[in-house]
Image (cartoon, rainbow, N blue to C red):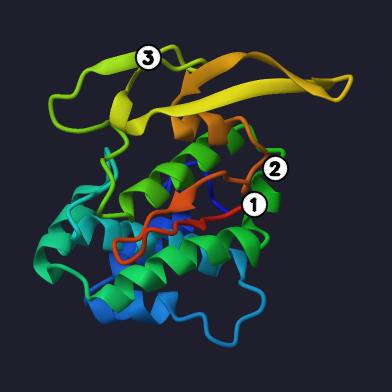
Amino acid sequence: MGTWGGGSFDNDTALDYLADIEHPHQLKETLDLRGLNQIEVSHAEQIIVAAEMVAAMIGRPAKGAPAHVITLAERFGEPPAKLLEAAQQGVMAALTRSELPRLWANADSSREFNMSVSRLVDRLMPGTPMPEGLPGEQATHSCVFCGEGVPRSRLFSITLRQETGGHPESYGTFHCHIACFNGALPAGQLVQEWKREDTREPALAARG
């Protein structure tokens, strides 16, 4: 794969694809998955980059994204609704219809891969706060995984219970970043929701 990290742009395929992007129509072509039951790994990596481009086009680029991503996003402008939807569906397809997660399963950067995709899912939802929270928002809890603060708007809580004699016994509630929680799961498995602007019924985003 020519891979050196779990981030969206941390592989040769991603950077080669990014360098070739000249028009938003290329993103549409990459994200057009009609008739594809199985997606090649290289295509899945390109899908992730295309989705990152769409996220940048709606003003929600990845932290530390290549400068070229920002330049292209500013030139392309805001994407049509259908392209945003295609990016959302493309991320799910890359996780569920390709071998990409399996290749990450035993890799040293599998945690980074899951966290990167989890943050991408967040940034593809215009109606939700960015992963770091609202501007000026203070942290209200510490993440049980990384120890850093979590703002209330991005708080993810886990309650542990055990059935004892038919009665649930709670062991307490723990707080974390959703990306940190997903980083603890096997590669390609995410517990996350698409919170769409046009519905109050969020759909499960991706779970391998």
Across and down, in percent, residue 6 comes to: 50, 41
Say which residue appears at 30% left-offset and 23% top-offset.
151
Q: Quadrant of residue 72?
A: bottom left
Q: Residues within 10 Å of mark 1 (few under 14, many from 20)?
A: many
Element on which disc 2 rests: loop
Rendering coords of residue 170 (x, y %)? 68, 16
Q: 5 and 54: which one is in front?
A: 54
Which tag, 3 or 1, sits closer to the chain's start? Answer: 1
Q: Nearer the viewer, residue 88 or 40?
A: 88
- Quarter of the picture containing the N terminus is bottom right
Cα separation between marks 2 and 3: 30 Å
Q: Are marks 1 and 2 in contact (CB under 8 Å)?
A: yes
Q: Type of residue at label 1?
A: Pro
> Which residue is depicted at the point 47% across and 68% down?
89
Task: Locate residue 145, reporting x and y percent.
Answer: 52, 18
Name the disc covering residue 105, or none.
Answer: 2
> Of helix, strand and loop, which one carries label 3?
strand
Mark 3 to mark 1: distance in Å?
31 Å
Mark carried by residue 101: 1
Q: Nearer the viewer, mark 2 or mark 3?
A: 3
Between disc 3 and disc 1, the foreground one is: 3
Q: Amino acid at mark 2?
A: Ala
Residue located 39% across and 82% down the image:
29
Return the residue at label 3: 141
